[in-house]
Image (cartoon, helix red, strand yellow):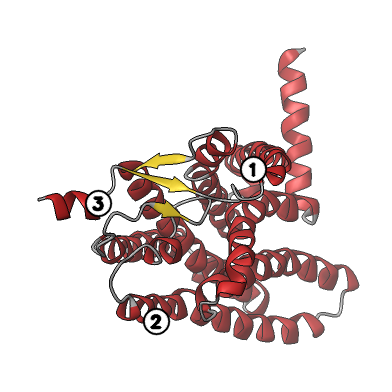
């Protein structure tokens, strides 16, 4: 009985950069500002996409899903991180760690698939414009979005279960800002080779395969765009696809670095910063990238603001 109690701590200590206290205040400010921008930016995208009838298209349906996902994604980790950075005892309960692990992994896996679905939508829109409304009908959009969410949560259920089954033998210091699979595997007091191999295989499925499909889609898109005679049409196509490519590069690049590189003591701190990038910075940048580079969204924002002022008058 004592061995069981030892192997499952009641709480975990999230070390973060506690060995460098001078970093804590700057990190607190960065995390807080990023979180506020993430909340307002993604809420704005959701509201505009739902309230403006001109944005009731498959592209903005998937963008709304992405914004909702990013809202939940950051909320699963950032509030706890902000509390811990300004606290002497940087702890999280066992139940809180389990919930954080499951939600963060589920939403991260869902985003991997959703970004691939969004690239397929752009492929059909540009390469098959005459058949776009027939191919990307409402039912298919709902099915693709549902498949992304269900697959992401199913993967998280599997990964979380396998990770939490590993005996910890009293180890409870997580060398990270939040509960993530690679950090928790390091706490185990048994051989984790099988878990690491399984994590690598799943990461290939959820990271490398979607990236390859996205690159293939954009190869066809580039060919189609270059054939467009109108300069304005070509610029609009490149602008829309460029926004998606920036998001893809930021998210997949950092996630691949974290999950598909061989473990190394030298990369420990770099791994923490990289995970913060795809866990905090990318969700904050997504709405900015899609709105600043998109005339339709900017126009919708202007119409919404004008409508609000008219109501007030």
Residue where numbered disc 3 is placed = 8
* Tag nearer the camera, 1 or 2: 2
Quarter the C terminus occupies: top right
Instruction: In the rendered structure, find residue 201 and report the number of the disc placed on it.
Output: 2
> In the figure, is residue 110 to the left or right of 270?
left
Label 2 vs label 3: CA separation?
27 Å
Towards the viewer: 304 or 206: 206
- The answer to whether residue 252 is seen in the rendering is no
Question: In the image, 71: left or right of 191?
Answer: right
Q: Where is residue 134 in the image (x, y as percent from the top left)?
A: 51, 69
Sequence order check: which comes first, mark 2 or mark 3? 3
Percent of width and height locating residue 204: 46, 81
| Front tag of 3 and 1 | 3
Going 67% across and 42% down the picture, which residue do you hit? 24
Are there few (<14), some (14-19), or many (20+) residues within 10 Å of tag 3? some
Tell me the tag on residue 38. 1
Q: In the rendered view, tell whether residue 296 sits above or below residue 232.
A: above
Can see residue 11? Answer: yes
Which numbered disc covers residue 277? Answer: none
Secondary structure state at the residue bearing disc 2: helix
Q: Would you say 210 lies left or right of 284 here?
A: left
The image position of residue 174, as x and y in percent, is: 44, 54
- The answer to whether mark 3 and mark 1 are in CB contact below 8 A is no
- Tell me which residue sits at (9%, 50%) in the image: 1
Q: Which residue lies furthest to the right in this view?
A: 231
Give the CA distance from mark 1 to mark 2: 31 Å
Earlier residue among tags 1 and 2: 1
Mark 3–mark 1 Cα distance, whole angstroms, equals: 34 Å
């Amino acid at each position: 009985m004592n061995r069981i109690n030892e192997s499952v701590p009641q709480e975990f200590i999230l070390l973060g950069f506690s060995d460098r206290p001078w970093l804590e205040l700057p990190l607190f400010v960065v995390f807080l500002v990023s979180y506020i921008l993430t909340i307002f930016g993604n809420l704005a995208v959701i509201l505009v996409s739902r309230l403006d009838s001109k944005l009731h298209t498959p592209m903005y349906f998937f963008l709304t899903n992405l914004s909702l996902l990013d809202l939940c994604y950051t909320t699963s980790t950032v509030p706890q991180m902000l509390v811990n950075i300004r606290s002497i005892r940087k702890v999280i309960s066992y139940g809180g760690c389990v919930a954080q692990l499951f939600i963060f992994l589920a939403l991260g896996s869902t985003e991997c698939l959703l970004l691939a679905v969004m690239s397929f939508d752009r492929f059909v829109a540009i390469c098959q414009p005459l058949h776009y409304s027939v191919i990307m009908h409402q039912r298919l959009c709902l099915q693709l979005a549902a498949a992304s969410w269900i697959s992401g949560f199913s993967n998280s259920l599997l990964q979380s279960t396998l990770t939490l089954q590993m005996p910890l033998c009293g180890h409870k210091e997580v060398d990270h800002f939040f509960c993530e699979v690679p950090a928790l595997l390091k706490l185990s007091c048994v051989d984790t080779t099988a878990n690491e191999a399984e994590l690598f295989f799943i990461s290939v499925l959820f990271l490398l395969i979607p990236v390859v499909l996205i690159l293939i889609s954009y190869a066809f898109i580039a060919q189609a765009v270059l054939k467009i005679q109108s300069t304005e049409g070509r610029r609009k196509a490149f602008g829309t696809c460029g926004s998606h490519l920036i998001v893809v590069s930021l998210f997949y690049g950092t996630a691949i670095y974290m999950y598909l590189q061989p473990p190394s003591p030298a990369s420990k701190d770099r791994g923490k910063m990289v995970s913060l990038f795809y866990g905090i910075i990318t969700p904050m940048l997504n709405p900015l990238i899609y709105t600043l580079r998109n005339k339709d969204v900017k126009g919708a924002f202007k119409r919404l603001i004008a409508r609000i002022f008219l109501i007030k008058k």
